[in-house]
Image (spheres, rainbow, N blue to C red):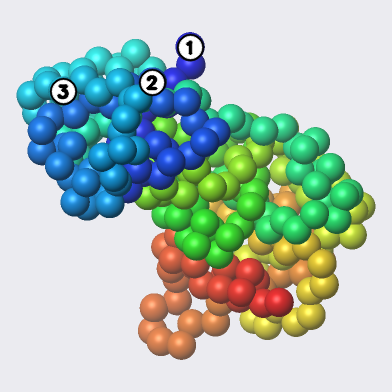
């Protein structure tokens, strides 16, 4: 059975509470269980029926390292002495999202164009959940991998956003445009810093921190916005820029 390794107290609690997840096993030391109660706010009855392997704090790290190696993740020390094994997060194809758009369902879409760093991706996902983004879309190639580090940084957001993969982001955006969705690209290669009137479904497109949006993506975008610096520093980390852009795009009615 394919399984996800969830680390980070808040990420674990949200995964346990996600009815779409099947919990396989909770591995923890006594301190780890205590942190789930005190830091995560989980109730004792929420752990009823969950298989709990109670071991020493050292053994938690040993078991985590073995699982990381099996799944080809780079091991880093598991925080708080606890991790969760659950059924794998489903990665969706584009058709269900297109069906939602065609059926005039309320969706908010965030596209990530070449964001490979899991720390940035996790932080962006956490902010996206804050703004009630429903779908994060990325191309199969040249993007981040979903794993325990990202789950920890996303702080539970992974449980509330549909993750959609496509073969080509430009082709995906073209399909959106045909459905009367106007993708909004965040780029410094425009003079426009005002969103203006955008009716219907909102779709924000973010590029990688080092090179921004790809040329193939930029060519498709009728609407582009930039963040105008007010001080001497003229650039931002992509996850910080993403947060400001989401405030511009997704907080508007």
Q: CA distance from mark 2 to mark 3?
A: 14 Å
User: Which callout, 1 or 3, points at the residue further toward the start of the chain?
Assistant: 1
Residue 33 quadrant? top left
Q: Is residue 98 left or right of residue 43?
A: right
Query: Which x, y percent locates residue 76?
Result: 23, 33
Residue 249 quadrant? bottom right
- Check disc 1 and report the residue beneath it: 1
Q: Is residue 50 left or right of residue 170?
A: left
Q: Closest to the observer: 142 or 125?
A: 125
Q: Residue at x 30, y 21 (%)?
A: 51
Are circles 2 and 1 on residues that touch, CB within 8 Å? yes
Q: Mark 1, mark 3: which one is toward the viewer?
A: 3
- Check disc 2 and report the residue beneath it: 24
Look at the picture and state if 239 lies above or below 19: below
User: Which callout, 2 or 3, points at the residue further toward the start of the chain?
Assistant: 2
- Check disc 3 and report the residue beneath it: 54
Look at the picture and state if 76 lies above or below 122: above
Tally the numbered discs.
3
């Amino acid at each position: 059975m394919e399984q996800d390794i969830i680390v980070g107290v808040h990420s674990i609690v949200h995964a346990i509470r996600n009815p779409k997840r099947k919990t396989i096993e909770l591995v923890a030391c006594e301190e780890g269980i205590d942190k789930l109660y005190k830091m995560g706010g989980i109730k004792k009855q929420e752990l009823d029926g969950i298989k709990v392997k109670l071991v020493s704090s050292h053994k938690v790290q040993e078991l985590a390292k073995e699982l990381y190696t099996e799944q080809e993740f780079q091991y880093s020390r598991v925080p708080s002495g606890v991790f969760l094994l659950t059924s794998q997060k489903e990665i969706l194809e584009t058709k269900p999202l297109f069906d939602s758009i065609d059926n005039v369902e309320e969706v908010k879409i965030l596209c990530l164009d070449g964001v490979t760093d899991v720390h940035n991706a996790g932080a962006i996902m956490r902010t996206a959940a804050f703004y009630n983004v429903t779908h994060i879309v990325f191309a199969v190639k040249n993007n981040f991998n979903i794993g325990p580090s990202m789950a920890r940084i996303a702080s539970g957001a992974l449980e509330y956003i549909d993750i959609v993969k496509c073969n080509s982001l430009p082709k995906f955006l073209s399909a959106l445009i045909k459905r009367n969705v106007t993708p909004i690209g965040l780029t410094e290669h425009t003079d426009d810093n005002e969103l203006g009137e955008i009716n219907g479904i909102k779709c924000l497109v973010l590029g990688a921190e080092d090179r921004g949006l790809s040329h193939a993506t930029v060519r498709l975008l009728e609407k582009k916005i930039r963040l105008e610096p007010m001080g001497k520093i003229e650039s931002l980390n992509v996850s910080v820029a993403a947060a400001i852009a989401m405030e511009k795009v997704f907080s508007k009615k």
